Amino acid sequence: MELSKRIIFAEVLVMVTVIWIVPMTYGHGSAWEAGRATFYGDKNGGETHQGACGYGDLNKQGYGLNTAALSTALFNNGSTCGACYEIKCTDSPQWCLPGIIKITATNFCPPNYKKTKDIWCNPPQKHFDLSQPMFLKIAKYKAGVVPVKYRRIRCVKTGGVKFEIKGNPHFLMILPYNVGGAGDIKAMQIKGTKTQWIAMKKNWGTIWSTGVVLTGQSLSFKLTTSDGVTKNFNNVTPPSWKPNGQSFDGKINF
């Protein structure tokens, strides 16, 4: 009986620990961190598409205008591409507006070491360069730059993870997008119908590559997000895929 009680207690403790840790991983209930925010582009999101993460038309890819370019301290050489944040304007009553926005990291705000002031994106600044429409939800246009509080949150996306195929048959590049859960990808593997799983290398941003020729095979993918969760996306493409920017739906998400 005593052993059974210990086992039950241990199981309950593990469950409570998981319930407590998982929300903390995405920022729910965790302390807000201090940062700053500006905006770039126009009211329609001009200049916010493309960018250092490798995404394309953000409207077609499901991100819309709820996006930001991250400073060096947050971008982490592209490892944070796809991560989601909550942001609110604070400590500036003259310029702040009430409310909280949710954004996905889709670009990089590069540092400028020649400037001696307004160095928002230089290390160690934790800075968000928002699309203009997102900035105007939390601050007035004339503010230009405002202090904010931010925290990581779980990404909630509609539909399955999508895979865009680029490059050429001898240097295949895959852009996974519309990724839920943690949002940012730590590792990626690819498999053809005639191969085992092949580890892909991060090329730049959130684009992954392989030199293995997989022409004529249906492709499957395995993604691991930054929180360690792994999912398999089986037979995502037909054997007739082309590396010309085609996108395929993985059907499931994190």
Image (cartoon, rainbow, N blue to C red):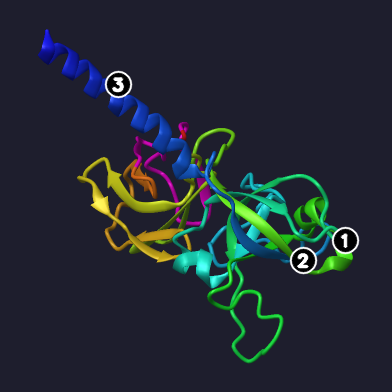
Name of the residue lying farthest toward the bottom: 114
Q: Distance between the residues labelled 3 and 1?
A: 49 Å
Q: What element carries label 3?
A: helix
Q: Which amino acid does label 2 sit on?
A: Gly
Q: Residue 94, which numbered label?
A: 1
Quadrant where the N terminus lies? top left
Residue behind mark 2? 41
Query: What residue is rendered at 46% in x and 41% in y?
Result: 24
Query: What residue is rendered at 65% in x and 53% in y?
Result: 58
Percent coordinates x, y for residue 7 in the rendering? 17, 18
Q: Earlier in the sequence, mark 1 or mark 2?
A: 2
Quadrant where the C terminus lies? top left
Q: Earlier in the sequence, mark 3 or mark 1?
A: 3
Query: What residue is rendered at 47% in x and 35% in y?
Result: 253
Q: How far apart are marks 1 and 2 (CA)?
A: 23 Å
Q: Residue 12, which numbered label?
A: 3
In this rendering, does residue 169 appear at all?
A: no
Q: Which of marks 2 and 3 is nearer the N terminus?
A: 3
Instruction: Work out whether residue 231 or residue 226 is closer to the camera in this orientation and state it.
Output: 226
